[in-house]
Structures are given as structure tokens and as C-alpha cells.
Image (spheres, rainbow, N blue to C red):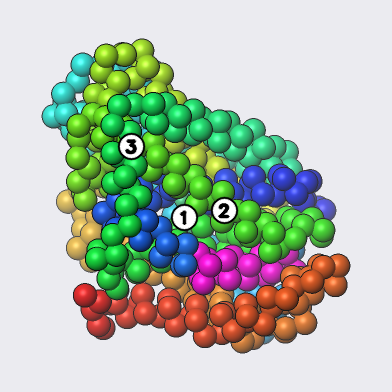
Amino acid sequence: MSKRENFGSKIGAVFATAGSAVGLGNIWRFPIETGRNGGAAFIIIYIACILLIGIPVMMSEFVIGKHTRSNTAGAYQKLAPGTQWKWVGRLGVFAGVLIFSYYSVVAGWTIEYAWLALSNSFLGKTPDEFGKIFAEFSTDPVRPTLWLIVFILLTHYIIVKGVTKGIERWSNVLMPVLLGIITILVVCSALLPNASEGLNFLLKPDFSKVDGKVVLNAMGQAFFSLSLGLGCLCTYASYFEPQTSISKTAIEVCTIDTLIALMAGFIIFPAAAASGYHLQPNDIGPSLIFITLPNVFQMAFHGLPWVAYIFSVMFYILLILAALTSTISMHEIVTSYMTEEFNLPRKKGAVFETGIAIILGTLCALSFGTLGNVHIFGMTIFDLFDWTVSNFCMPLGGMFISIFTGWYLDKKVFRDELTNYGKHGAPYVRGLVFTLRYITPLAIFLIFLNQFGVFNFA
Ligand code: TRP
């Protein structure tokens, strides 16, 4: 087998991992969840979830990956040979196939919308027309599938270049551009009339809205946004250089991810306030970014059509970049597994994943139109994939990962990895082990019970 590659620099490792974390989840979900679940109260709960669950699970994945320098399924075989733990890794690979397939559908839609923005097609449209444009596009049998394939091939192109020359090099370009664009958009939004009203709505703490469901939403959001539970972070950590600090990287990645999610809110809410539009609870997910926002941007800058134009173009380019750095990380879970476990050249492993994703992704893309009648367990194919990954594989993976590092893994390995073999202190190790043993699995278990209706939070 050829020599295993590394991220050549610490900053490259941070950009790549933060690139995985920062994705559509930050932009289309976090702001609205915050707005409707009590503003700053939700943000506080979200940050608590990150501290109690996000960072511990992330650090566990980092330890497993960095120590074994292996894909996620191989990692468990190295740390727990002859046991069934390998299924935790395999579950991640399975979920990686699913998530890459359906996420790429929406990623493909962002290209269509960047194109619509670029060709100035939003100018003068009414809200109804925006709804119609999206309904016609998403149910079309051809265009969404073509964009899906384009997006998958774009990801494939970066993946086959390798870890250093592909993932790292591209992350080092895409992430700074993404940060630049999002900063410009935040500033533009802040200059709009009534901007403070929008921010007020986003940030005003309202603890009366907080109940068990809100806490569960915050936990689910943290999982998805930080790319937890599927071995994605484990795979990336297997490329960390020996001197990369696990705790520092985890804190940096979580900080960047949370800041970008907040910044997305700082773009969306002032623009909505300036346009006079009141965001509704169902303005979440695709309908937010493909129906509500193009309209909001037109109305917010109505006297300045060219500003609306540039703003919209930049916003959809931002979405493409955010989605791309995430799809790369999803693809890599499977490619590294195929390459290492089946001894294939990287290119062949990547072609395998790309091929499956094109087939499954096409089914997902068509499930909005042509295959809209196909229901499995009462869900369309797209929804079934999303449900399986978000509500099942992610929490289950996260729970087993924390049980694995909390209970099974040799604590010397854990400590060695966290202190970089004694090079720096890690006074938090005891607290972390306690959290991984008791708090994290229990919290996730509650998500499950609630999800499957064993009991219901108010
Ligand atoms: N975190 C990404 C987002 O917010 C999604 C994502 C990328 C992901 N890679 C992942 C989720 C791996 C779970 C596992 O959009």
C-alpha cells in the first residue's frame, strides 16, 4: 500500500475539518432554529450542547482516528481487534454513502440558484413567482439530476487529487474565500434599514420558549453541524500530523462552526426585517434558501437593484462553497474505507463511491418529482435517507463513540493522544472521561427515546 498522506500543516487540518463542519446546516437551519426557539436562550443551550456533547464526541473521534491513522472502520479493528466495535465504523461508512447522496442533491440546487442569480433572473419577481420557480425546478426530471452529477464530479475531482493536494489545498482556498464572502454579506446586511430590529429578534433571549423539544433540537443541530457520529472527523484526524493538538483543533473547529452559523443569522434576519417580511417557522431548510431568501434579498435592496444582484450572487456562491467543503468530507469517509479495507488504489475507491452516489443521489433528486409517489415507511427517498442519517445513524454513532472512548478504550491511549505523548498537559482528561461515560451517552439515549415515541417531551 502506498504511504499514507497527511495534512501538511496545522492550519490546513483546521480549514479542512472546519470545512466539513461548516455547511448547509449552518445556513439553512441554525438561524431559524435560533429565531423561533428563544433567540439567545437557544444559543446558550446550543453552546451547552457543544460543550457537553459536541466537543467530547469530536475529541473522541479525533483520538480514534489520529491514534490508528486509519479509516473509520479500520480504526476500530486496530483498537478493538476481534470485537464487534468495527460495526460502529461500518455504520459510519454506510451513513456516509447515504448522506453524500442526498446532501449533493441540495448542493446541486445551489448551483442552479447561483446561475439564476448570476443571470439576474430574480429581478422583479413576486413572492409567488419565487415559489413557482422552485417548485418547477425541483420537480424537473433533468436539471436537478444534472447539477447533482456536476456537484458529485466536482467533489470527486478534489478527492482523487489526494489528501494534501486535493482536500487540504482546496480547503485552504475555499475556506478563506467563504469567510471573506460571509463577512461582506454580514456587513451589507448590517447597513440595511431596520437591521437592528432583525438582530433583536434573533438575539433577544426568551427562556419561555425553551422546553425539552428545544433542547433536543439543539442537540440534533450540534450533531449535524459538527459532522459528528459518522466517523468523518475520525477519518480527517487520521491525516493530522503528530504534533497537531486534538483539544486545540476541536475548540477551533467548534468556534469557527458556531461563529459562521451566527453570521448566517446576521445576514438573514436583518435582510428579512428590511424587506418587511416576517420569517415563519416553516421558513427552514430548502424553502428558506430557495424561496424566501431570493425574495427577501430583492425586497431588502429594492432601490438598489445592482446591490441586490451582487448580494444574491455572493450568497449562492457562499452556499456552493459551504456545501462543497462538506461533501468532500463525506466522500472521504467512504473513499478512505474502500481504499484501505479493500486495498484499492485511491482513484478506484473514489470511483466506487462516486458511482454509488450518482445512482442513489439520482433517486433522491427524482423523489421531488418523478418518483414523488414512491414512499418507503411513509417517506420519500430523500426524506428516508435524511431521516436514517440524522435521526438514527448520527446519534447512534455518537453514543457508541462516546461509550467506546469512555469505557472501552485504554485510558493510556486516550491520555497519550490528548497530551501528545506528554508534550503538554491535559488537566481536563478526568472530566472528559466522566462526560463520555455518563453524560453524553445518556443525553443521546434521551434523543432516541423521544424520537421513537417511548416518551414525549412537552
Ligand atoms: N456539517 C455539515 C453541515 O453543517 C454536514 C456534514 C458534513 C456532515 N460532513 C458530515 C454531517 C459528516 C455528518 C457527518 O452541513
- From the Cβ of disc 2, is ligand 1 less than 8 Å away? no
- Dot 2: element: helix
Residue assigned mark 3: 196
- Crowd band around label 2 with a 10 angstrom C-alpha radius: few (<14), some (14–19), many (20+): some
Question: Which secondary structure, mark 3?
Answer: helix
How many C-alpha atoms fall within 10 Å of the one at disc 3: few (<14), some, or many (≥20)?
Answer: some
First of labels 1, 2 by sequence position: 1
For mark 1, what is the residue?
225
Question: Which numbered disc flags the more N-terminal residue, 3 or 2?
Answer: 3
Q: Is mark 1 within 8 Å of ligand 1?
A: yes
Q: Earlier in the sequence, mark 1 or mark 3?
A: 3
Q: Which residues are magenta?
A: 50-68
Residue 248, given in percent of the width and then of the height, sits at 69, 59
Spatial separation of the CA atoms under disc 3 and disc 2: 24 Å
Residue 341 in picture, x, y percent from top left: 67, 64
Q: Examine the rendered structure and indicate whether residue 304 appears above or below residue 48.
A: above
Query: At 52% across and 85% down in the image, what residue appears?
Result: 438
